[in-house]
Image: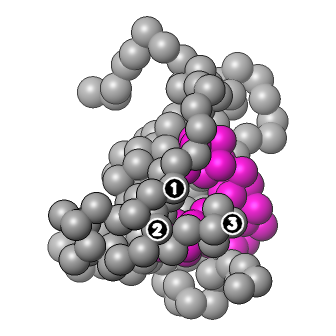
Amino acid sequence: MPFTSKTSWRSKLEKPQERKVFDVPPAMQKRCGSGRMLIPRPLDVDAAIRLVPKGKLVTQGQLRTRLARDAGADVSCPITTGIFVRICSEAAEEDFRNGRKRVTPYWRVVRDDGTLIEKFPGGPKAQTKRLADEGIQVEPGKRGQPRVTELERHLVRWPT
């Protein structure tokens, strides 16, 4: 059953909030390392995804690295960034249903190992179709999780 809410996904995406940069909490240092951590805004995540051209992909790790670098931080929070990627995907589908032709290409975001994201609208099946429309092939991965074929060849190369 799809998630429903009284608040539109577009409203969640555009909710006014500030970026936050702070020291990585000790409880997260094992996973994220030390240094400064970014909590991005949903619109920051949306803008970064919009930079991925047709026929290219970005991993969640690349996305977090780009967001952190642009904000002068060492890392971007994996939890909030993941939540905001989901909000971007749902807002894009909401926009598409409302007649917009150009929406944020969230389907170009994959996990670091190239597997597809179950929480996107329509799940991996819909993401597979959108990727196929851009010439990107998907194969069954471990435990049946769909995975992009030749991931490295399709990754976006952002300047460092």
Q: Earlier in the sequence, mark 1 or mark 3?
A: 1
The residue wearing badge 2 is 36
Secondary structure of the residue carrying numbered label 3: helix
Front position among marks 1 and 3? 1
What's drawn in magenta, residue-wise? Answer: 40-68
The residue wearing badge 3 is 70
Front position among marks 3 and 2? 2
**What is the C-alpha distance between the residues marked 1 and 3?**
12 Å
Kindly indicate the quadrant of the structure image that contains residue 72.
bottom right
77 sits to left or right of 131: left
Q: Position of residue 51 (x, y in %)?
A: 76, 62
**What is the C-alpha distance between the residues marked 1 and 2?**
6 Å
Quadrant where the image shows the N terminus: top left
Instruction: Count neighbours of disc 2 (C-alpha within 10 A) and say few if under 14, some if 14 to 19, many if 20 or more.
Output: some
Kindly indicate the quadrant of the structure image that contains residue 99.
top right
Checking the image for residue 108, the label placed there is: none
Q: Are marks 1 and 2 in contact (CB under 8 Å)?
A: yes
Quadrant where the image shows the C terminus: bottom right
Identify the residue at image location x=72%, y=71%. 55
Identify the residue at image location x=37%, y=46%. 119
Secondary structure of the residue carrying numbered label 2: strand
Which kind of residue does numbered mark 1 sit on?
Answer: Val
Q: Position of residue 88 (x, y in %)?
A: 57, 41
Secondary structure of the residue carrying numbered label 1: strand
Checking the image for residue 21, the label placed there is: 1
